[in-house]
Image (cartoon, rainbow, N blue to C red):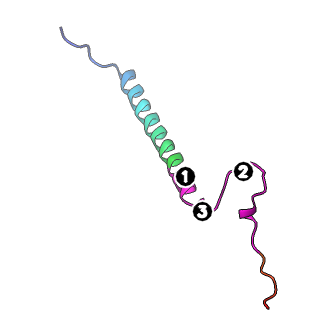
Amino acid sequence: MAFRAEHEMHKRRLGRNVGLGLVLVAFVALVFGLTVVKVMNLGEMQAFDHVVRPEMIPVEEGPSQ
């Protein structure tokens, strides 16, 4: 049983599918990269729950004696 010759439409569809797959992989890589950079640069950041935390308030030094 022989396979039929591939139609030209299938070749175009394959090209579009590969292109779309590459765009999706690039998008996922971009989002992952931005997430990693954001997580690495958090530092002293805490959750945004609109609650004042004493440890987040800068300490003002008074006059020395």
Most distant residue in the right direction: 63
Alpha carbon separation for disc pair 1 and 2:
19 Å
Q: Residue at x 38, y 28 (%)?
A: 14
Residue 50 lies, in percent from the top left, at: 78, 51
Label 2 is placed on what type of residue? Answer: Phe
Q: Mark 3 = which residue? A: 43
Which badge, 1 or 2, is on the more N-terminal residue? 1
Label 3 is placed on what type of residue? Answer: Gly
Q: Quadrant of residue 15?
A: top left
Which badge, 3 or 1, is on the more N-terminal residue? 1
| Position of 42 relative to 50 (above/below) | below
Are dots 3 and 1 in contact, CB under 8 Å? no
Alpha carbon separation for disc pair 2 and 3:
14 Å
Alpha carbon separation for disc pair 3 and 1:
16 Å
Q: Residue at x 23, y 13 (%)?
A: 3
Which badge, 2 or 3, is on the more N-terminal residue? 3
